[in-house]
Amino acid sequence: MKYFADAMEAKLIDMISSEDYSISPEILMERAAYAAAEFIKKHISIYHRILVLSGNGNNGGDASVAARILNEDGYNVSLYMPYYEKASELALKQYNTAAESGVDCVFAFRPECFDIIIDGLFGIGLNRNVTGVEQIMIKQMNESEAKVFSIDVPSGINASTGNVMGIAVKAYATVTFGVMKAGLLLSPGNEYAGIVHVAKAGFPAKALERICRKNFYYEPEDLVLLPKRYDDANKGTYGKLLVIAGSYGMCGAAELCAKAAYHSGCGLVRVLTDEDNRVALQENVPEAVISCYNSKEGLCREDIIKTLDWADIVAIGPGLGKSETSAELFDIVVKNVKVPMVIDADAINILADRGDCSKVIKNAVITPHLKEMSRLSGKPIDAMKEDMVRFAKENSSDDIILVLKNSRTVVANKERAYINTSGNDGMATAGSGDVLTGIIAAFMAQGLDRFSAAAVGVYVHGLAGDSAEEHVGQYSLTATDIIDSLGEVMA
């Protein structure tokens, strides 16, 4: 598990390191620049012509120190500071030190004359659109053939949200300091950042944990968080999951959800679906118990409640439709369920018609994509994209874990946030969300708490998609391929 920070949190880490742990800004800057220079040297040649672009804030100071270090190591370095007269005291000090140590200082920005550009124009503090001369400079960088390395964040990317502030540097790689920045994980910032290297920059571990411990992302070693398996277990040990899915003539989503749950380790899966789907599900998911209602004859409330009482976890929504029968079924479930739920797809759309979901739903994981979340919250998609993490936290609660699905999915409650880094474009295919629902519900059935099941489930889902991409490519990837790759990922 690795932490991430937004811009304000990153500034707090800087301040705490100096004020509470007596590490001066100059020392932090020296360590950060050394780490950046060491990373950059692994990707360049001693024969490359390097231009270091130093802005007027601390990010520019980091860049100037990196220029001095590279110059002392024998690299061909030129340094350009466009706003010398506006530079902060520390940035100006580092620029002058670099100049005095022999770095070639130039007074015109000509990126076409260089092979490598080190971008230190803007740092994490950017909160306005880039205009004027800076806009032209970034455009010139992007149009040049130079390989660009950005310091902390690509100039023009919002460090908290990943949004492009008018225009942004398209970096080959980004060296960020101390802790990952949210804007380097979220789209489109992750696409502009290129290769991201989190460099140790001298921040005390306690300062990082104090500020960032509730915001995190996973890496492959975190698969140790998967539900445990036991030598003396039986199928009941790994939970009983009820999947309420599939309407008349729509059995595919129910099948995908149930299969994904079994492939994710669930012990027993029962599918409650329309009678029309019985034969297909019995043939395609023989491991599952199939219970049915007849939408043409109406629902039997007592039978549904009895089925609910069987389950440890309930997943509802895939392929359910929005018919009167589906809406009635949903209402019976939410009024009588006594165990945690995963709510997805059509169940979310039905829920959106019920008004304030916090008054309807308790003890649940909800998995909307942005359009579904727009219906649920009444907020436009653009408003969500302004700050996905903040929006997800504000629209979740202790009762509702929100899985806000996008190219970079966010899992949140009021206090914690997880940003997913696995997955690929090929997963934008029919049934992918149904598979995710099955995975999350299976992990809950095996004993993970709702937040952990959602975060680990999203990560595993993406890893399975990445594994499937290696076998079939993005164009041909299907939801079934994701299911088929679950075993490989979790093994």
Image (spheres, rainbow, N blue to C red):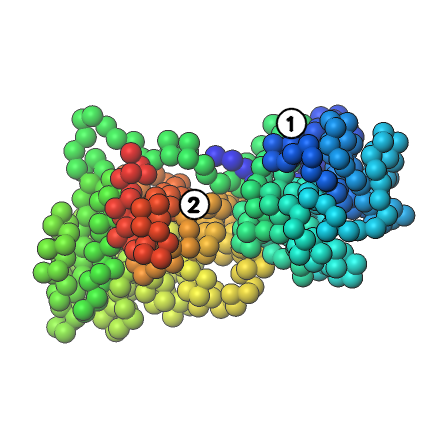
Residue 6 visible, this orientation: no
Q: Secondary structure at mark 2?
A: loop
- Taking 317 as reference, is 119 left or right? right
Seen in the picture, residue 386 relative to 28 is either above or below; the reply is below
Where is residue 280, by image quadrant? bottom left
Q: Amino acid at mark 2?
A: Ser
Q: Position of residue 84 (x, y in %)?
A: 87, 46
Residue 42 visible, this orientation: yes
Q: Earlier in the sequence, mark 2 or mark 1?
A: 1
In the picture of the structure, the residue carrying the numbered disc 1 is 204
Kindly identify which numbered label has been placed on residue 422. Answer: 2
How many neighbours does mark 1 have within 10 angstroms: few (below 14), some (14-19), or many (20 or more)?
some
Q: Secondary structure at mark 1?
A: loop
Where is residue 115, by image quadrant? top right
Q: Position of residue 371 (x, y in %)?
A: 44, 66
Q: Amino acid at mark 1?
A: Pro
Where is residue 93, by image quadrant? top right
- Taking 104 as reference, is 303 left or right? left
- Taking 396 as reference, is 468 left or right? left
Q: Position of residue 350 (x, y in %)?
A: 34, 67
